[in-house]
Amino acid sequence: MDSYHFWQDFFQTFRASSDFIKAMWIVVPSFTLLGLTWIVLISRFRRVMCVDTTPTLVCCATSLSPTK
């Protein structure tokens, strides 16, 4: 019996899939990476903007409230 090759089976399945699925393989990971990068950068920016002596969560919650 021949041995099973995971990557060979994976790429055969990928090649047999529809064009929409192939496009999603490109779009979904890239948007996920962009979203995670945005979350990290925004959280770092908010941490830098909070220079109070109050705890970070309280500072960030108050900095997001609309100004009067």
Image: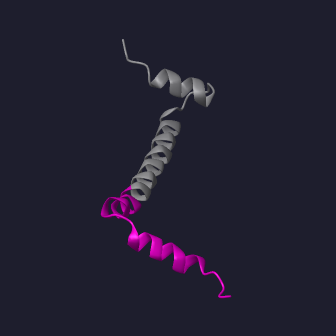
Question: Can you name the residue that lies furthest to the left here?
Answer: 19
- Horizontally, is 10 left or right of 15 in the view? right
Give the image location of residue 9, x and y in percent.
53, 76
Relative height, residue 22 to residue 54 (above, below)? below
**Above-or-below relation of 59 to 15:** above
Q: Position of residue 55 (x, y in %)?
A: 63, 27
Instruction: Tell whether 42 sits left or right of 59.
Output: left
* Place of residue 22 in the rendered image (x, y in percent of width and height, measured from the top left): 36, 64
Magenta highlight on residue 50: no
Per the image, is 23 magenta? Answer: yes
Q: As drawn, which residue projects farthest toward the bottom? A: 2
- Residue appearing at x 68%, y 88% in the figure: 1
Closest to the observer: 56 or 53? 56
Nearer to me, 1 or 7: 1
Q: Say which residue appears at 39% left-offset and 66% top-offset.
A: 17
Closer to the camera, 10 or 44?
10
Main SS, magenta region, reads helix
65 up-or-down from 13: above or below: above
User: How many numbered dots are placed on residues in this image?
Assistant: 0
Quadrant in the picture for the C terminus:
top left
Q: Residue at x 52, y 28 (%)?
A: 60
Residue at the extreme front of the image, as rendered: 1
Which stretch appears magenta? 1-27
Q: How is the image coloured?
A: one colour
Q: Position of residue 47 (x, y in %)?
A: 53, 38
Residue at position x 55%, y 78% in the image: 7
In this picture, is 21 found above or below 15? above
